[in-house]
Amino acid sequence: MAFSLQSRRKHTASAGACAVLIILISIACVLQSYISFNLQKSKDKMTGYLSDICGYRLSLDGISYSFFGGLHLRGLAIFYTNQPRASVFISDARVIINPLRLIFRQFSVSKITIYECGLLSKKEEGGLNLQIILSDISKNLSRTKDARIKLIDTDLSIRSKSARLDLIDDRFLYRGMYIVFKDVRISRYRSGKAAVKGEAKFSCHIPEGHYSARFLNNRDMEQGLKFNFQATAINANDLNIDMLSLDLGDGQLIGTGLVKDYLGRNPYNDIAFIPSNIALEAITFLKENFNPRGQLFLSLRLNGLTDNMAPVITAITQNCSVRYHIANGEIFDIRNMSGKIDYASGLLELKDMSLKFNSLPIEINLKSHISEEPDMIISLSLPKDFLAAQNLPLQSLKAVFNGTMIKNTLTGKLEISSTYIRKNLNLTLAARLSGVDFDYYSLKDKYFRAKELEFIKDNKGAVQKLNFSNFNTNVIINKDFIHAKDISAQGYNGALNGKLIIDLKARPNLQFSLSCQDLNIDSLMRDVNITKKISRGTLEGKLTFNNSLKEFLMGSCYIRNGTVQLEALSETVKLPPLQNVAFRIMHIYFAILKESIKVRGVKLSSPDVSLNAYWDTNRIVKGALNIKLKSELLRKSPQFKKLLDLARTNTAYVDFRFLMGGIPRAVRILWMKGEFKEKITAALPGWVKRSIESNLNDAIEDLSAQ
Amino acid sequence: MKLNLNIILALFLLCLNLSCVSLPQDNQFAQILAETNTVSPDLTFMRLNNYLRDYPGSTHEKEIKFAIGEYHLGAKNYREAIYSLSNYIKNYPVDPGTIFAQALLYKAISAYNQEPRLIAKIKENFFAKSVFLLFSQSRVKQYKSILNNTYEIKEYIDRLEVTKNNGLFITITP
């Protein structure tokens, strides 16, 4: 009996409690609905009021309230000045407010959750629009004195599940860029501390016509990272960045810094990151396009006003590699890349960068202003030890391009220079091309044109040169070779043709051949400055170079229908003057080895004189000279007339054969045995022979002194 | 007439007497030369040095200095040979004996310290002038020293041969 009474009482109590709860919940629901209804009804008034306070036009699609979820905002947009597109657009957000404080006319926000947000960043007068909006709103809110309600400063937590920031910036590299944020958590404390962390992905699309587009498999440049930002407000205006970490996955950058006047319209930022190792594979754009390997030791600094923050980057690469491959077989395989990269104020520099390009070792120095049409100075050279290993007597081989990238072509000037080492005699050789136009963009045959081509040889101040114009060739670059084919140029009323091949297979091999036809001798000799003794006539020649051969440079030339001055010869041997000797053909063939120069087959053919010689010259001279002189010409000299009579020579021509020795500066000549010499030697007394020799030697000494 | 004859006779006798006069230093020098083959080279060397000391600036200075260099080389005193021959070449750059002194110096340097730059310079001097060999295979120069050594330099097209007393002394190539 007692038991059933107790349980009846309990049952009644719980039923009562449920009833109260239900009533309370019902009241709450009704209240909630009432509040939501009123909020929605006075939405326009509210947005008008907030617009007045903030100083910016606001719009709101919907607002409601729940006791547990707080204020639910839908379609909140903030517009900068008279812009048609909202600078801030929040599609869905919940604002947790303290309802008890409302009773006391105090508005306090403890948490904001943004489900989806869109931000538009644009440079306006005085700074970035988003920063200006933040600055103005915070100032206006702090100045607002409304008796109806008071904004309470409290710890605030903001969470953004997904946000996208679009950059409206016409500057090169920033065009079309946007950043997607995920799960960003912002904590702001009354003590002045702030923390932000989340994930971000930078994206940029390289348009079709861009000068790099052809080399990219994926023209969408994306880079994801996790960031963690902790700061402390100091001096009421400045924000001290205690830590900013950027985690790329395979590499992390940690920095600190200062933001001066962080709530101002255009704060000044100075953030420096500790130099750190970043794997090249962590840079997504490189990974998707160039198969990179290796590490960068990277130092990054960001400083400047918010609307013009400039990165300063210094990176050191050590044994990095990238590999670029496109379907038609064009392969760039770059390995062992080591050197320094600097970027600041739009200027990119590669300093003393050494690498292997398709197995060819190269040293690169580059300076380029990164812009729509970047200008650049790029220097490529072969390392000294590589040249020595190829057994070439070259101290250096270097190409320097100074120009601009305009509409997928390189235009400017190119100079290729080399120093050839001989004992005590270094020669500087250079080829200068101006008005260069190189179609690097083309997939297969890349045309290479130059308005002017100048070959220069500088030998201890004596400059020799050749000038050509309208230089043309087509270049094919492959993994195994670089081929410049169908080389053509014009000059001296004639034409130049040739080809160049750099074979990059097992052992790099450079070959080129150039041939010329119908070059005018007068204008050519003026420029080439070898001798003034040859004039008139036309030149036809060929030059070949092959670094794998012992005779690595060989050349031959034919001069036809020209004139040569042989006064030196005629004065020396007391012949009648040999001026303006017309010849049908003169032929010279030479070869250059590591230690010497060989001249073979110097032939001159004219009615009165025919000459045939060969010699080697480096430290010593070795060679032979054969001259055939017309007897009729010899008889014009009184001395030779007597000798011919003495020797009873009746032939139309007299042969003279000589051996050459000594050194290049003081050649020694020996008259070899021959019919004429035998007869003269037998016929002349000893004292006459000695006198002739003595006079001849004196004449040669005088000639040498001249 | 008689007076003229007397004057002529007096002049004749004067000239005859003058021709017979010999200075004391020339006598001494002649004596040294005369005894070169009979006494030891060391004694000759000593006498020549004394002569130079006693008669500085004499007309035989050049020959004696050459002989001193020659002596040192023969005695394998290379350092002294290099010193004395270098001085000879410096003091008498265009003397007919200079080229022979250069040959001796080349020999001394080659035997002593093989100084490459000096050797190269000497070679450059030897081959500094062009030569035209018409009727013979070589051009010959000769020098006889006061120590009775005959040196011959034969210039060929590709080399230089130096003989001493008809024996090959050195061969120099460019």
Image (spheres, coloured by chain):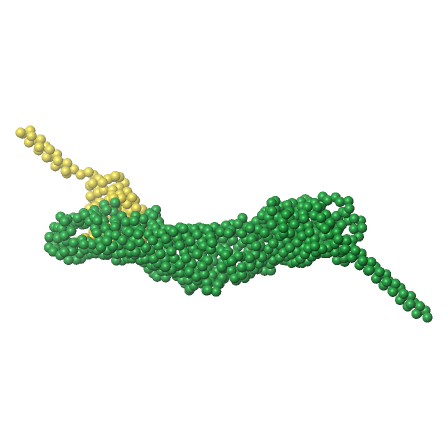
Whether residue B76 is visible here, answered yes or no, is no
> Would residue A208 be found to the left or right of residue A475 on screen?
right
User: Which residue shows up at 23% across the image and 49% down it?
Assistant: A565
Residue at 42 percent of width and 53 percent of height = A437
Quadrant in which the C terminus of chain A appears: top left
In the rendered image of the structure, the colour used to display chain A is green
Q: Nearer the viewer, residue B25 or A535?
A: A535
Q: Nearer the viewer, residue A302 or A278?
A: A302
Residue B126 is situated, as x and y percent measured from the top left of the image, at 27, 50
In which quadrant of the rendered image does the N terminus of chain A lie?
bottom right
- Judged from this view, the residue extending furthest toward the right is A1
The residue lying toward the viewer, choosing from A78 and A602, is: A78
Q: Position of residue B114 (x, y in %)?
A: 33, 53
The residue shown at (61%, 44%) is A126
Q: Judge whether residue A265 can be spotted in this image.
A: yes
The chain drawn in yellow is B
